[in-house]
Structures are given as structure tokens and as C-alpha cells.
Amino acid sequence: MDKYGLPHLEIQVLHFKSLIMKTKNFVQLIGYLGNDPEVHITTTGRILGRLRLATDIFLKKEDGTSSKKTTWHDVNAWNKLAETLSGQFIKGSHVMVEGGNPIPHIL
């Protein structure tokens, strides 16, 4: 046992994991599709799906009026996930996109 009350082997495993996972890359977007998804086959035979996703933020001004600011996001999906895009979604669909390491999801 060490000073944390864990066997020595477990400390080594925890330390090893901390070397691998120093940062995390994850994003979640909820918005509307700006156009129909595009699905292409690359020259290497992989399937690529492309989405254009709009997210909005509403800002309140000092005079009491509000305004909307839209941010556009370009999203790429690959292989099986890309295959499902053309049949499932159309322009204006309300979608949630989650992505990061290792596998993105589109719900």
C-alpha cells in the first residue's frame, strides 16, 4: 500500500492513464441543418458525409431589445455514420451532434 491506500500496481496504472489522457476533445452542438446532407465517396473508397449546422445565441441589448446571432458549423461524418445521413435528415432538421475522441454521434 502507498500513501493513498492503493496497492502499488494500481498507482502505476492510474499514472499511465494520466499520461495518455492529458486533454479531452469533446463538443456538443444542437441546431438546425442549413441544407440537405451531402454524401460522397472519397478516392480511397471511404464514405464522407457533410453537414452545415446552424446554432443561435440570443443577445439582449441595453435598450431592452434582443438580437439573434447565428454561428455556422461544418460537420464531417465518416463511413457508416455518413451513410445514414442522406436517408435520415433534410434541410431544417433539428439535430444534436456530439463529437470528440474516439467516435462522433449524430442524434
Image (spheres, grey):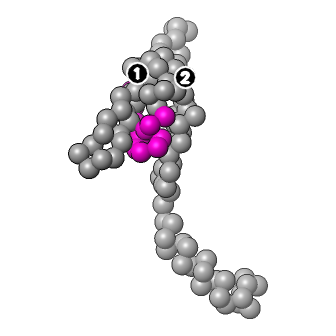
- The x, y position of residue 59, in whole percent, is 51, 19
Name the residue that disc number 2 marks: 94
Region rendered in magenta: 70-84
Residue 47 lies in what quarter of the image? top left
Distance Cα–Cα, label 1 vs label 2: 12 Å
Q: Return the residue nearer the eye: 72 or 98.
A: 98
Q: Does the magenta stretch include residue 63?
A: no
Q: What is the crowding at mark 2: few (fewer than 14 residues within 10 Å), some, or many (at least 20)?
A: some
Q: Which residue is drawn at 40% across and 27% down?
A: 37
Using the image, determine if residue 57 lies above or below residue 74: above
Q: Quadrant of the N terminus?
A: bottom right
- Which image quarter is the C terminus in? top right
Please rate how many residues cluster around mark 1, counting C-alpha atoms within 10 Å: few if below 14, some from 14 to 19, many from 20.
some
Residue at image point 54% right, 72% down? 18
Contact between labelled residues 2 and 1, with CB atoms less than 8 Å apart: no
Find residue 36 and name its label.
1
